[in-house]
Amino acid sequence: MSAQKWAVGITGASGAVYGVRLVRELLRGGHTVHLMITEAGWQVFRDELDWNTDDREALIREKLQQDLPGALHYWGMRDFNCPAASGSYRCDGMVVVPCSMGTLSGIAHGASGNLLERVADVMLKERRRLVLVPRETPLNAIQLENMLKLSRLGVTILPAMPGYYHKPQTMDDLVNFVVGKALDALDVPHELFRRWGE
């Protein structure tokens, strides 16, 4: 598969490991990734992954980029110079993983209140792939209505619900299943889990 350009947003919903794993898999495949992390997302890095986020650029290089062949570009939430914020940039699509209910609401209502929401809005207006991976339970009626609204607009709503038919043995197996499903939604090849019937 030829290299593509993807936008990835990581928000403050629980499950930062999903976003980290997705970015690394896209880079492993030689793709370009435009990465956006909300302030709450940085907090979840500290709380769930025990990462020191004092030097964000160094952390991204150490934990995400390493020696992977793809190109990683990190953008601050107010930096609208990000190419993916313009419809004229040929971005192949976007994944928000994990996606908080606040971010999902902002996208559903076209708020464009930060770079992540703006890039998602561009995906909608240009009719490009947009995959949202919410990680919240239980869900209230407002959240469900926002998801339905986005689904009707062509957005893939992919809740972080791992399958068990592949007989997961570790937490990594569960993470890989959800990330693999997100890559499937992008038509990006992977070998993160064993498929039914294989």
Image (spheres, rainbow, N blue to C red):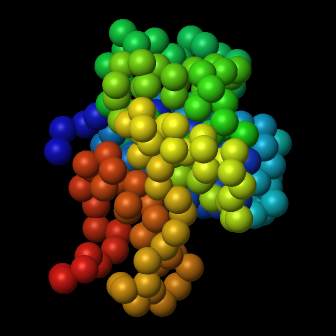
Horizontal side, residue 177 vs residue 46: left or right? left
Nearer-the-camera pick, 152 or 191: 152
Q: Which of these two is toward me, 77 or 155?
A: 155
Q: Measured along the vertical axis of the image, is residue 54 above or below residue 46?
A: above
The vertical placement of 56 against 163, above or below, is above
- Is residue 163 found left or right of 30 in the rendered image? right
Q: Residue at x 80, y 49 (%)?
A: 43
Residue at image coords 43%, 84%? 164
Q: Report the quarter where the C terminus lies.
A: bottom left
User: Which of the 4 quarters of the picture holds residue 196?
Assistant: bottom left
Locate the N terminus by quadrant: top left
Number of numbered discs on residues: 0
Please tell me in which quadrant of the rendered image residue 94 appears: top left
Residue 51 image point, x, y percent = 75, 57
> For the point 66% across and 21% down, which residue is it?
111
Task: Return the x and y of residue 187 as percentages of the image width and height.
Answer: 25, 48
* Image location of residue 44, percent across then percent down: 76, 54
Residue 37 at least partly seen:
no
Q: Residue at x 78, y 43 (%)?
A: 40
Along the line of sight, the residue nearer the viewer: 134 or 170: 134
User: In the image, is residue 17 above or below residue 10?
Assistant: below
Asked whether residue 184 is in view, the answer is yes
Image coords of residue 48 (percent x, y): 75, 63
